[in-house]
Amino acid sequence: MEGLKVSDANLVVFLHPSKSNRVSKAVLHELSSHLFQFSEIFDGVLLAYDVDIVDRNAKLLSGIHPYIGVRLKAKLLLFSPKPNMLIEGNVVKLTPESIHVIVLGFASAVIIDEDVREEFEYRTKHGKEVYRSKAHRRHVIEVGTMVRFLVKSLDREILHICGSLEPSNTGSIHWLDQNFGELSLIDRSGTKRERENEMKMQEHAVVGGEEISLGNDQSKKSKKRRLREES
Amino acid sequence: MSNNLSAPDPAELSSSVGSGSNNMGVELANERAQFLEMEEVNFTDNELVYHVRTALKSASSGDSESYDELIGVMHHRERLSPDEVAMLVTCLKALSGTVSCIDVVHHESLLSSIFGMSMWNYGPEVMDALVDLIISLAASSGKFVDSCLDMLIRNFVPPYSYLALLKQPRGLSRKDQVLSRVHSALESISHLVPLAPMRLLSLVIQRMPRQNDNETVMMTYVENMFKLESGSMGQLVGSTMLIAVVDRLLDLDLEIGWEDIVQDDSSKGIFEMELEDLEEDEEDLNDEGDELPGKHLSRNSLRGNVIAEKLDSLLVLTFEYLESCQGHGRLLEVFETLLHSFRITVLNAYKSKFAQFVMFYACALDPENCGVRFARMLVDIFVCHDHPPMTRMSAVAYLASYLSRGKFLSANYITTMLKRLVDWCLDYCNVQDGDVNPFAHRVFYAGCQAIMYVLCFRMTSIMSIPRLKSQLFLMPIETILKHKSDPLKVCLPSVVGEFLKQARAARLFTVTKTFIFDDILESELSRAFGGLERLDSFFPFDPCLLKKSDSFIRPNFIFWSMVKTTYDDDEDRDEDEEGSGDEDGEESVDGVGEDRRDRMATSFNEQDIDIEEFDYALNKMSITPKQSLMYKFGGGLEELVRMPSRIRPSTSPESL
C-alpha cells in the first residue's frame, strides 16, 4: 500500500533537567507523544520509531532551566496519505450511503455513495449488508473485507480520510488480487495493440518488479502498474 | 449511485404524495402533512433521503425555504404530539442518510439545532434516530467528530428543568434510556473513528462540572465518567477518568477549610475534647448514632456545608464504583490508576482531609493486594532519597495513619512494615550524629513518630502473637529513640507520651528521663520539624467526618476507643498505684464499658473473625480488663462512651 515510508531523521530532543537521570526513558516518552498525530515536520503520521542516541554528550540550553539537548538518529515509520494515493483498509460498516473503512487500525476513512462507482450496488442479504459488483458477481464488499481505495482528502487533525472507489483498480483486495488479469481484459476492451502493450508491461513488471515499486508519481501511472505494485 | 438513480425525481415525488403541486417549495411548506401522508403511501427510505438531500443542496445554492422547514421540525421540543414525533423521527432518519451533503458552513443552523437537541426531552424513538444521526455525522467527516462527541457528553446530564424528576421512577427510567444510548453511541463512534477516544478525553474533562455546580449534575456526570471507565473504551480513557474524579474530590476537599471543621476552643486541651459530653441530637439518633464525641462535634460544624455534602456524595459514589469493580474482578487494575493519581496529587496536597479515603476503601476491599501495594508504595517513597523531604514526610504520615487505622491489616504485615521503617531509621542513626535539630532531621523525626504512632495502636495485637512479639523485641527501637538527635523530645508529645506508657507496660523499653508533657498538644520542637505544613501533626486517616462516606469506612476502621492498650491490664492489677488523670472519666462509665464488651464479643461471633480480631477476643477472655473500653461498631443507638485516650492527636485542630 502507498503512503507508508521509512525516514531517517536526525533529531535533537530537549529534555527538562529533572529528566537527566532517565534520559533514554525521557527520549522515548517525548517521541511517543508524537505517535498517531499528524506532524507538519515529518509530513505524516508517526507510526513507529527506532532510535539511537548518537552522542553521550548533550548540549545544554542555557536558561532558568538548563534543558539538555540530546542528539538522536532515528528511523521513523511515517504514514502520509496524499490525494490520489491508493491505500488499504478494513471495512467496518456499510450503509446505503457510505462505506466506513479503518486504515492501519487507527485512521478512519469514509467513501460516500457518490464516490462508489456505479458498478457496485448496495444490497441486504439475510440481514447482512453488502456492496456487490453488478459486473463481477463475486466482487463483494462486506464488513470485514479489506478494500483498496483512492484517497480524496485527509483531515489532518483527526486523521479522517475521504476515499473513493471510482477507479476500477479499487475494491476488495482479495478479489482484485485474484482477478486483475481478467479485469484488465474485460475493462480495457480497447484495441489489440493496447492489449499487447499491457502484456508487455506485465512481463516487464515480472522482470523488474522491484524497481517499479520505487516510483512515486502515481497519477501518471497506468492502472495496471498500480495494481502490480500493490500485489 | 444506484440508490440515487432509482429514487423518483421531485415532480414524481410530489404527485405521488398527492399534493397536487409540482413545486418543491410549496410541497415542503406543507411538510408535516406530507410526511404523514408519506407513511400512508409507503415512501421508501431512499425517497426520503433524496428529498432531504435536495433540500440541503438547494440551501447551499441559496434557496433555503425547504431547508428552513427542516430546521423548523428540529425545533419542536416540548410535548410533542404523536404526529410531531413521527415527523421528527422521519426527518432525523432521512438526515442520517444524507450526512455527506451536510456542510459545516452552509448548514450551520441545521447543525446547531441538531447538536442543541437534548435526548432527555424525547421518547425512545426520537432518541434512537438522533443517536443514529450523530453516529453517521461523526463518521462522515473529521470536522464533525468533536461536535458530535461534545453533543453526547452534554447529554450526560439532564437539562436543569429535568433535575427534580431524577428522583422519581419515571425520571430514572428516562435516565437509563438516555445514558445507555449515549454510551453505546460513543462506543460506535470510537469503533468507526478509532482516534475519537483521544478527543473524547479532553472534552469530558472540559465539560466536567465545577465545585460550585449542582450536586445532582455532578453526581450524574461522574456516574457517566465511571461508565466510560468500565466500558469498552475503558482501556483508552479509563485512567484519565479516574484521575479526573480524584482531582475533583481533592478540589472539593480543599474548598473545605480547616476552619470549617475545627472548633477553636483553646481553653480545652486535646483530652478534654475527647471527654466532651456527648449530646446526640435527633438527626443523628436517626442515623447510626454511634459516633465519637470529638467527631460528632466537628461534624456539627460541617453540617449545612454544601461543599461537604457534595464531597460526601461523590465519595460514596466512588466507593460504590470501587465495589462494583471488585465485583467484576478489576479492582486491582483500577487501583493501579488510583495509586498513581494518589502519588501525584493527594500525597502532596496540603493536608488533604477526605480524598485519601478512596485509597483507604479500595485497600479495605482487597487488603491482600491493594492494601499491601499501598503500604509498600508509601514506605518506598519514604525510604527513597530522590523524593523531596516534604513528600517523604507526608508519605510516612500516611503510612502511620494507614497502618494504625486499617482494621483489615494483619498484625504480621504491620510488623513487616514497621521493620522497614525501623531499619531505615537505624541506618540514618548510624550515618548521622548531630544533636537535636528539628529541621535537618525532619524526615527522621517523621519516621520515628510514625513508628511510635503505629505502636500506640498496634502494640497489643503484635504482642499477642509470640512470633511477632519476639520480632518486635528484636527491633532496635530503643537505639533509635535514644539517639543523640533525641526524637522523643521532638516528636509530638501526645504520641510520645502514649507510646512510652505502653512501651513501659509492655516492657519494650523504659526511659530513665522523665517526660513531663502535661497535656501539651505539641511542642515547639515538633512544630519545627513539621515545618509550615505541620506534617508533625498530620494523621490523614483520622476518623472520616463525612457522614455517608463514614458508613463505608467505619466497618474497616479502628477507632482509638477500640484500641486495647498494653497498660490496660496493668492498670487493672495495680490500680491503686497507677492513678492517672484520665481515669476519672473512665470510671464513670465503667458499667457501660462492660456492657459494651459483652456485646462486642457477640458481634465477633456473628462476624467472620479474622486473625487479628481473634487475638483481640482472646486477650479479652484472659483477663477481663475493667478499664478497657471497647467500642462496638455498627451497633444501634448506643450512648457513647467517654474516651480515656491520652493520645488523640487526631482531635488536635491541625490534624483532624
Image (cartoon, coloured by chain):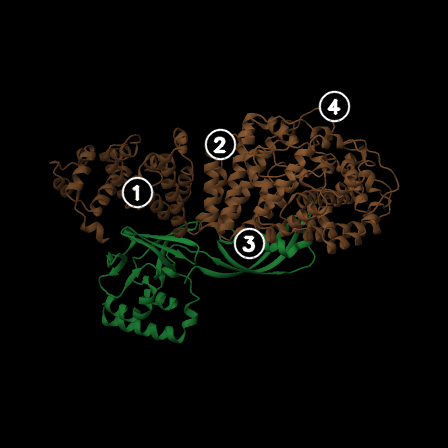
Q: Amino acid at mark 2?
A: Glu
At mark 1, the secondary structure is helix
Q: Chain drawn green, letter?
A: A
Q: Quadrant of residue A123?
A: bottom left
- Residue B215 marker: 2
Q: Which residue is mark 4?
A: B267
Position of A161 compared to A141: left or right?
Answer: right
Q: Position of residue B105 (x, y in %)?
A: 35, 38
Disc 1 to disc 3, C-alpha distance:
39 Å
Amino acid type shown at disc 1? Ala
In the picture, measured across the screen, residue B287 lies left or right of residue B654, that is left
Asked if labels 3 and 1 touch by Cβ distance under 8 angstroms, the answer is no
Which is in the foreground here, disc 3 or disc 2?
2
Q: Nearer the viewer, residue A46 or B654?
A: B654
Residue B158, percent from left and from top? 40, 34
The residue tagged 3 is A32
Residue that badge 1 annotates: B129
* Comparing labels 2 and 4, the label whose residue is closer to the camera: 4
Q: Nearer the viewer, mark 1 or mark 3?
A: 1
Residue A23 can be seen in this image = yes
